[in-house]
Amino acid sequence: MTRHFLRKIGVLMGLAAGLALSGCAVMDKNIPGWAQYRTPDRSHELRLASSSTGTGEPVLLIHGFGASSYSWRHIVAPLAQKFRVITIDLKGFGDSPKPRDDAYSVYEQARLVRNFILDNDLKNLHIVGHSYGGGVALAVSIYLAASNPELQKSLVLMDNIAYPQELPEFVKVLATPILGPLLIHALPDTLQVKALLKKVYFDDKLIPQSAIDHYAANLAKPNAKYATLTTARQIMPSDLQEFSNNYASLRIPTLIIWSREDEIVPLSIGQRLHENLPNSRLVVLNNVGHAAQEEKPALLLPHLLDFLEAESHRAATHP
């Protein structure tokens, strides 16, 4: 890159940070709320990209904002030794369709994932959701508890959205009119991804170039930037506080895993979630960032495997 180009990038990023801090993000308030999604339907159906490996009870892994099933790459093989591991790409991400519509909310994603579960006849199901995908996992679990309670055995939530909170700066930037589209199209994809991963990781030295390259390639796919911008504007439903009243009735065994150093979704969210989910256990990890499955999978895996194995065995011995 030329010095002139780098200077322009510095000015743009400085402007973005200033506007983010001044609260110029505009969230989409016109999307349907939970009341409209309470009864899921089959309209506007699309096929989510997925893969499956291993045998046994199914474990469905749901990735976070800006990521894809690639984010689970370090834990699929260990889990697949005892479970059938299924990864999906949410609408707008990875290899899934990216239609130019206005339906990218947590509730819309949950509707699609719930229908994926029914279409694939997944029983004795364990759902694992991270970040934005954890919000999706919560909504999917509430769907299943109401309509198909026999299908799901357990839930794992990792550093996920659950209540109204201060938006991360990068989401504020993407949701800022004019500036968000300008930056996502003007800045090199690798630069955008690296800046985001520095917020995700606790130790920036652990960010692999292969991950930067992979996510940058995803961002370069047709309509990927549109999907990212639209998701950013819809990432925090306006009725999220009202929706959270459903958590107290969700009684499936739930493991909540959080990083003490998370810069994106603070630990206080996980603690509040633990208080409101009646059958939950909270594990707090140290010296790792927002995505333990990417940064330090060896730190995450023992907790994840112990919980899934225990719930699988308990359900088998005490139907």
Image: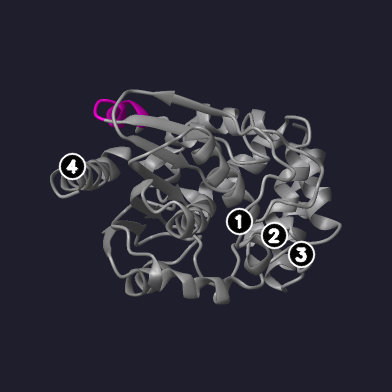
Mark in front: 2 vs 4: 4
Q: Nearer the viewer, residue 302 or 85?
A: 85
Identity of the amino acid at label 2? Gln
Q: Which residue is mark 1?
A: 106
Which mark sits nearer the N-terminus, 1 or 4? 1
Q: Residue furthest left?
A: 317
Q: Any magenta on residue 79? A: yes
* Residue 72 in view here: yes
Residue 78 lies, in percent from the top left, at 28, 29
Q: Is there CB contact under 8 Å for labels 2 and 1?
A: yes
Q: Nearer the viewer, residue 26 or 52?
A: 52
User: In this image, 169 relative to 10: left or right?
Assistant: left
Numbered range of the magenta stretch: 76-82
Residue at 58 percent across and 71 percent down: it is 240
Q: Residue 234, which numbered label?
A: 2
Q: Which residue is mark 3?
A: 28
Which mark sits nearer the N-terminus, 2 or 4? 2
Q: Which residue is mark 4?
A: 316
The residues tagged by marks 2 and 1 sit, at their Cα atoms, a distance apart of 8 Å
Identity of the amino acid at label 3? Asp
Identity of the amino acid at label 4? Ala
Which mark sits nearer the N-terminus, 4 or 3? 3
Residue 215 lies, in percent from the top left, at 60, 33
User: Helix or strand or loop: what does disc 1 sit on?
Assistant: helix
User: Helix or strand or loop: what does disc 3 sit on?
Assistant: loop
**Quarter of the image containing the N terminus?**
top right
The residues tagged by marks 1 and 4 sit, at their Cα atoms, a distance apart of 32 Å
Which mark sits nearer the N-terminus, 2 or 1? 1
Q: Nearer the viewer, residue 94 or 60?
A: 60
Mark in front: 1 vs 3: 1
Residue at 44 percent across and 25 percent down: it is 52
Q: Is there CB contact under 8 Å for labels 2 and 4?
A: no
